[in-house]
Image: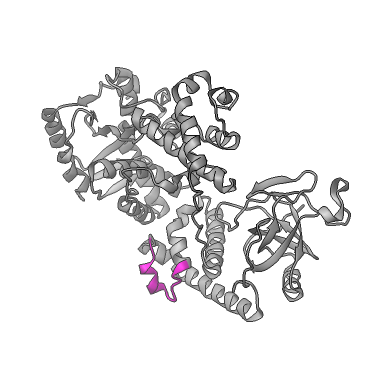
Amino acid sequence: MSPAALPPPILIADAENLDRLVAALAVCDAVAVDTESNSLHAYRERVCLIQFSTADADYIVDPLALPDLSRLAPFFANPAQQKVFHAAEYDLLCLRRDYQFDFVNIFDTMSTARTLGWPQVGLAAILDAHFGVTMNKKYQRADWKRRPLTAEQLDYARLDTHYLVPLRDKQIEALTAAGRLPEAQEEFARLARLRPEPEHAAPVREAFWRVKGARELTPPQAAVLQTLFAYREQQAERIDRPPFKVMGEATLMDLVRRLPRRTEDLHGVPGMTPDQIQRHGRGVLEAIRQGIDAPAPLAPQIEREPDAVQNRYDRLHTWRKERAKARGVESDVILPRSALWDLARRPPRSVGELAAIADFGPWRRDTYGAEIVALLRTIAVIIATLAVLGGAVAAQERKPVPKDSMRVSIPGCTKGYIFTAGRRTVDEPGSVSVPEGTHFRMNGPKKMLAEIKAQEGSMIELTGLTRKGQYTPGGVGVGGGVRVGPGPRMGGGTPGGSPVADQISIDVEGWRPIEGGCPTR
């Protein structure tokens, strides 16, 4: 049946109709479920709609009109009834956060599409390809807390669930034919175990350090950012809007750097429009005054994994990537990131010990267990060998960091005394993201430099100190006040006529081998 010919969805907005819905759901083997929340429009998001679709009807529950939804808890926890979601993780976390529901026997159509290696996994693309249905994206960013809901909104919301059970039936056939049903079920069970992060009654005082560029500020500037951030949070909570709709992070950082003292100084600050100045000018100036007088906050230390753990993770990550590429799926379909880290931190010595690893179920143990245990044994031999040879898996003793310098960790390759930075991915280590192809002149103990030079043609991670403010023509800032550039040409000479004395350099403290290919430039 085409969307235009569908009967209207049934709105559930009172206790009597909720009882009817519970009775209707109780006789179904499979029910499609979705939610709509207001994260783009509120300080603290909440579930604003819950959609259900059975073979007979589409239902839309209005949680704002029904403060008690505990009658739905037995349905979500019933192992004999399958709850069908698309992109289940967000819905499950929201429902568990707001209503403390427990979930048993779920099916996720997006997760299944990823397991099967489908080229498109979004619901709109899947419905178009398999049912010829075109979804209207008009209400994707709607404020679902606003009432009354229009008929068009209700129709939009029900299409998120109406076709999910028939889609599930198609996917079960495909999973069975591919022999991947147990793999998919293992992932469904992982999703059902997810728990939301605990909510704080008030913003964490250190949360301002998450603002982009915060760690590059001087201590007095960081104190001002902290008070401005707190002001923004207070205003966002007061008017029930997301903080970014009160003031953007880029505006906060500009205010910190300019330190305006008078209202007229706010004009020209990006983001401080006349309306913004009228609404927040006085509060912003007061927050800046408080920050100037406040003690400088200490930046929280970023905990770094031990080198042996990071080495195992890097190699496991490369193994997963290669496995996924060969199969034509995304890497986390092979093994979730939580399992990679658990393997790296608690490497099992046998296939039997894999049962204690997070999110590493029976299907994955049977399929990948022996291969991973063998890989971990190989890694252990490499780490032990490097430790004997004095390689930097056993980290070199670190020097104190001078005020004009900072410590960096960079992946790349060497040629002679020149280290060339390689591409850094999200999962690769490194305290700064240096542009690929950046050249560093290496300084350090002769023995260690000889070890590093012997790794020519292989990827390593270099750790050491580099001076703040170093500059070569064409250089770029990489954080912490460090400025790096192309460095000396591999074939000799210097770029842009810069003198040799201006070449950027790194005082090497340690190194370790990592996976990956050397940069080509």
Q: Check the image and report above or below for 492 versus 170.
A: below
Q: Work out whether residue 227 or residue 78 is closer to the camera in this orientation and state it.
A: 227
- Taking the image as drawn, is residue 427 in sight? yes
Quarter holding residue 89: top left
Q: Residue at x 52, y 62 (%)?
A: 304
Question: In the image, is 252 to the left or to the right of 512?
Answer: left
Instruction: Estimate the x, y position of residue 248 in percent, counting from the top left.
Output: 50, 32
**Count of numbered badges drawn on the protein:** 0
Quarter holding residue 29: top left
Q: Is residue 348 magenta?
A: yes
Q: How is the image coloured?
A: one colour
Q: Residue furthest bottom?
A: 388
Q: Work out whether residue 471 or residue 269 is closer to the camera in this orientation and state it.
A: 269
Q: Is residue 289 magenta?
A: no
Q: Residue at x 33, y 22 (%)?
A: 153
Instruction: Estimate the x, y position of residue 484 in percent, counting from the top left.
Output: 73, 50
Q: Residue at x 60, y 37 (%)?
A: 257
- Taking the image as drawn, is residue 119 in sight? no
Q: Quadrant of the N terminus?
A: top left
Q: Check the image and report above or below for 266 versus 70.
A: above
Instruction: Estimate the x, y position of residue 254 in percent, counting from the top left.
Output: 58, 34
Magenta stretch in the rendered image: 345-358
Instruction: Estimate the x, y position of residue 311 in percent, counting from the top left.
Output: 56, 67
Quarter holding residue 315: bottom right
Question: In the image, is 38 to the left or to the right of 443?
Answer: left
